[in-house]
Each structure stands twice: as structure tokens, then as C-alpha cells.
Amino acid sequence: MAKDIVNAWEDGRKLFARAAGLNPDRDRKREALVCLGEAVAEKRLRYTPPFTEFLRIQLQYIPLFFWAAQGFLVLGVFLFFWRFSGRGADFWAYLRCGSVAATWLGVLCHGMLGRHFFSGMSELEQSCYINLSQMWIIRMLLCNGMDILFLTVIGGWIAADTETPAGCVMTYLLVPFVLSDVCCLLAVNMSRSGKNRFALAALAVAMALIALCFSAVPELYDAACLWVWIAVLVTAALVFAWQIRSCYYKMIRGDIICLN
Amino acid sequence: MDERQWIRAIRRGEKQYLQDIIEKYYDDIFRFCAFWTGSREDAYDLAQETFLKFIRYVENYRSHSLKGYLLTIAMNLCRDHMTRNNRRRQYESSMEEMEEKGIAEETFAGREETPEEAALEAELSGRLMRELSRLPCEQREALLFHYLHDMKYREIARLTGVPAATVKSRVRQGMEKLRKSLKKEDFLDG
Amino acid sequence: MFELELRNVSKRYGSRRVVDGVDCVLSCGVYGLLGANGAGKTTLLRMICGILETSGGEILCEGSGIRKLGAEYRRLLGYLPQNFGYYPEFTAKKFLWYLAALKAIPKSEASSKAEELLKLVGLEEVKDKKIKTFSGGMVRRLGIAQALLGDPKILILDEPTAGLDPRERIRFRNIISALSKDRIIILSTHIVSDVEYIADRILLMKDGRILSEGGIEQMLAKMRGKVWECFVRPEETESYQAKYSVSSLRSTDDGIRLRIVSDFCPVEKAVPADPDLDDVYLYYFREDDKK
């Protein structure tokens, strides 16, 4: 068998090596090269932006209101924490503030992303070289990455100040964050008209209230309940990932781009 | 300067390297198209189209082997060409045409050899072209990539989007058929 | 030759066929896509732009599927959507810079190109004003300017003249005519006079299908003998209008002059008239009972 393959290869090589003499006619080749040379001369090279440039554009055109709101929120949380850490650490105050901030971070992110749709720019943006589906994914990752980083910092703060395991605190903070992400994406998906701004604002209030209610019931934060929190977190994260994926494909198909 | 540097230079706007690439690979692409279609006339057109497409989309070029990239364009164009024309009629008529004309003078116009040698080589190429055109196009492509262009199964697999094992079996099957039909004409021995 | 080929392109929403098997080959030149509202023009254009997936058929740019070409196809494109949205707090200049960035135009060129285009559409004086202060016509002109960014090989303008006043329409017509002819320009409209003077070819679209395609002269030639003029008494006009497709109606000293589009001579005294594009449009879009 092995010999057969070697043989075939040998034959094939020999066969094709001899056939490689099949050459184009000299004059016709020259003619073709001249013709192609003209095409090269006419060619206008297009600029391909490197990935860093792509990221820069994404950051540069994130609207000011988003940065401002995000800044206020982060600053507010830090001020609150700083005030409390001076007066002896209260785990519940920390958690309440952190949970509300976590839900608002999610709402803000989707308010920014939803603008592409609210403003009616989505169709035009989708027709560009850097199109909406790419921008949306990148901004989604950037924004959520930033938020998770921030939550990690305040989670660390709470854990250090109240001597609670950091993993627990992070779970308690990430659950409201991811849940608000899921709800916002659902809301943006259901209707992409300009009215959605109000829906998101209402959602922000509702989510904050729910977070406050939860953090008012200390029993929910018992060590025994931790596995429920983790289960909720994992489920919500999976749902969110699925939502992002389905949203992306809907965008590519054009279903949620074109308003009628 | 290697090919990657050529491409980088082209991206920077030094267009003269495009011409260098075309000159370097013209014969390879021509040969591939000639064997694929079984017609020299079509091969001139298809080679031209291949390079025009390459020029137009050079910014898009990402793969690591330039020759592989060009061959992929050529392969797709050949396939389109086949679907566009009525396959069977095209082949048979071009084969007949070639046989009538006598492949010897035409096929090897670019080589300087003694007439007997040239005739012998030409006959081989002509027969090979004819036999190849009778193979299914996947097998034909696999043979051309592997033997004519000296590519590894793995590379071919990447270009054609099928597993390497499939490429291997296509090459084997194609080669078997080829040998069988060539042997029938008592060819390999002579 | 640069070519865009539509092969049996269809779009279905449920059981409704919005675009129904459109076949055509577009080469360089200005195309007028004429059709009533709801004929499927916008849907067809969205598919040509690659924004909307086709339900059937394919769109090929120089032989390759546009969806497969992806970004490389999109960079050939200039598009003005029918519902042209914008970020209200952007200035006209920033808006063009933003789109130039998305269209991968190098920063060094973007600024001068934006200035040039703003001048072309007559917005240079308000380039630093926020778009929310613009009138409808100004927004539309900004839309036309952005579509021209990056010197697109395929320019698709969906209802470009909607909201433009007569003077702006003339300016628009001049802009389109001045663009060199080595590109494909598609203008969709339901107003015949928009495309009468600038389009090389007309595509007539009705109920998701292209009814007729051809040069204007060709279309007019086909109409010869189908347009009639006659004079009627004022009280008769209504009955004529009910019975025939009347393309124009003008009162003169001799009575009301009617222009009727019909395959047959509508009244004995009617004389054949020279067709114009309005008549062509009416001929294809007249109600079925008037045929």
C-alpha cells in the first residue's frame, strides 16, 4: 500500500513535471502583462485601517453623555464608599450602593448602544466598511469589560473592608449587573423606536428598586443561599451571551436594522 | 525581499510590486487554468481575470501563501467559467479543436527544444490535459495543486475547505484513473 | 467593465413577497428606479446594499456574491437611506468625519474631503452648526454629501429628492450629472421628473417586480401610438377620467384638452401625441380596469 502511494507520487511528479513545459505563447504573455500593467497603473490602493485605529474610532465617537453619566456614577459610588469606610464598614450599605450602581451600569451601556437604533442611523452604519454589527459587538465588549473592571474594584473594596470572601461579594454584584444587561437588551430588541429611551429610564428605576428590595432582606445573602446566586449568575450570563449572539445574527440578516 | 514584504510594500502604496508578482506567477496561473479548462485560449482569459481580480482585491489579501491565494482565485474563476459555459460541449469542442490543430506546434511555442523532443512533450501535455478534463473537477484540482504546484495535502485542504484526508483520497483516486487511462494508451511505458 | 448582477432576487416577509424575482444586470451609468410607494424599491435597494439578506436569489458584484465580499463590497458603496437618521448633536462636519472614519477613509483625506462635499451640497456655511438645527432639505443634502464620501463605485440613493425644494432639486441633478460615468448610480423615486433628465436607464418597479427596463428613448419609442390627445367639453371630463388613464388635463379656449394613455384610440377625434416619461409611468401603473 505504502509503496503504491510512493509510486503514484513518483508517477504524478514525473508526469506533471514534464507537462510543466506547457507555457504561454511569448507574445501573448507580453500582451497580457502590458494589459495588466495598465490595470496596476490605474489601481487606487484602498486604505485598510489597523485594528488599533478601529478601536480608536469606537472610543472617539462614544457620545459624551455616556462618559459623563458613567463618570458621575463611578465617582458617586467611590464618594459613598469613601464616606462609609471612614465610619466603620457596613456591609449592607456597601452592598445596596454597589447593587444599584451595577444595575445602572448595565442600563447606561445599553442606552449608548441603543442610540444607533433610536437615531435611525443603523441602516446607514450597517452599509459602511466598518459596519454596525462590528461596532456593536466591539462597543458591547468594551463597555461591559469596563463595567466588570469597576465592579471588581468595588467588590474588592467591600471584601477588604468587611472581611467577606471576595468571590461572594463579586457574585452579589454581578447578578444585578448581568440581569440588568439581559433586561435592557430585551427591551431594546422589542422596540427600537426613539421611545425606548423612556423604557430604559423606567427600567433603570425598576432595576434599582428591585436591587434595593433584595439587599433589604439579609437572609438572601446567607452562605446557604450562595449556590442559588451562583446558579442565577451562570444562567443569566448564558442567556446574555445567547442574546448577544442572536442580536448579532439578526443584525447581519438586516432584521433589526431596517425599520419600517 | 520576500512575498510578505512585497504585500506590505503594496499596502504602503508601492504599486510596482504588484507587477512583479504578476510576472512571477503568470506562467503558473496560466498552466493551472490551461489544465483545468483543457483550453489554452480560455487559459489566457482566465489568467488575465485572475490577476485583475487580484489587483482589485489586493487590500483584502490575508492568507500566508501568495501563490495559494492566486490559485484559489483562479480555481474559483475556472469553476465559474465551467458553470457559465455548457460544460460538456465546451470540453469536447475544445479538445477536438486542439487535436485537429495538432497540439505539438501550439502547446510548446514558448520552449526551445529539438522538434522531436517538443513533439513528445506536447503529446504528453495534450493527453494529460484531455485525461484531466475527464476527471471530476475536485479530483482534477487536487491533482493540479499537488503535482503541478507542489502543494502539501494540508495546504490544499485549507484552500479547498475540505479535510486533508479527503484531498489525499481525491489525489489517489484521480491519479488511479489517470494512470489507468494513460496506460490504456500504452503511454507511461513509452 | 464594472457590473452588478441581480439573479432572481426575492424578499419575503411571511407569505408576502415584497421583492419578487428581480433579474437584471447593472453596469456603469445612472439608473432611475421608478415605482409607486410600496412597490418594493427600498427593500430592493437595501438588499443591493447588503444590509438586508435576500430570501432567494443572489446579488453578484463582478461575479462574486456581495455577502461573501463583505467589507470589500461595502467600501465600494455610497448609500442614502430613505429614512436618513443622524445624531442630532453632531455638527455637519463631525457627522461627515464620523462616516469617513467608518468608511475607512484615512484621516488625512477625510477633513479636506468633508469640506469639499459640504461645499458641493451648499452646506459650507453651516458646517459647524448642529444637525438638529437643520431644515429637512438641509438634512437631505447632508445625506447626499455623506453618500459621496470615499468616491463610491456604487451609489445608491433612496428617494434623494424627498424634501428638497425646486432649487435644491436642480442642484442635486447637477451633482449627479457631474459625477463621472465610471460608476453605478441608482436613484429611486416615485417622481418621474426627478430622473427624466439624468437617468440613462429606467427600471420600472411594481409589486416587487421590474416591469420594464431600458433607455428613456427606447421606452418612449415603445409608447408611440399609445398616447392620445383630444378636446372634450368640461362636463365630459369626469367620465373620461373614470374610463381612461388621463395623464394631463388642461383647459383651453377650445374646451378641455385631455391627454390619454391607452392601447387603443379612445375617441374618434383623438390624435396621437408624442409620449413623455410621465405617460410611460402612467401606462405601466394605471389601474387594471383602465387597460
Image: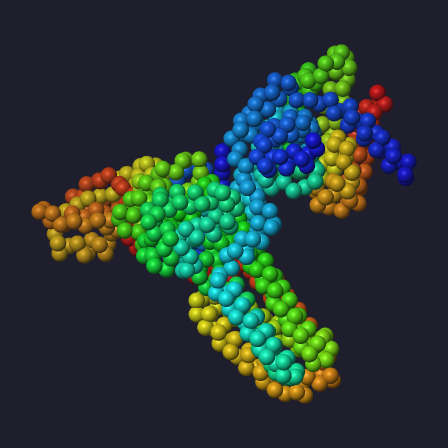
At which x and y percent is residue B148?
75, 30
The one nearer the camera, C92 or A253, is: C92
Q: Please tell me whether residue B167 is drawn above or below residue C98 in the rendered image.
A: above
**Residue at the (57%, 75%) spot, across then down:** A79
**Residue at the (43%, 50%) spot, across then down:** C96
Q: Please tell me whether residue A22 is drawn above or below residue A93 in the rendered image.
A: above
C13 with respect to B90 (left or right): left
At which x and y percent is residue C138?
33, 53
The one nearer the camera, C148 or B26, is: C148
In the picture, the quarter occupied by the N terminus of chain A is top right
C63 with respect to C265 (left or right): right
The one nearer the camera, B169 or A249, is: A249
Looking at the image, which residue sits at the far left?
C253
| Residue A76 can be seen, yes or no | yes
C46 with respect to C283 (left or right): right
At which x and y percent is residue A101?
57, 75
The one nearer the camera, A221 or A160, is: A160
At which x and y percent is residue A29?
62, 22
| Residue C12 can be seen, yes or no | no
C187 with respect to B34 (left or right): left
Looking at the image, which residue sits at the far front?
A86
**Residue at the (40%, 60%) spot, across then down:** C88
**Residue at the (78%, 26%) spot, across then down:** A17
Among the 4 quarters of the image, the one containing residue B177: top right
Among the 4 quarters of the image, the one containing residue A55: bottom right
In the picture, the quarter occupied by the C terminus of chain A is bottom left
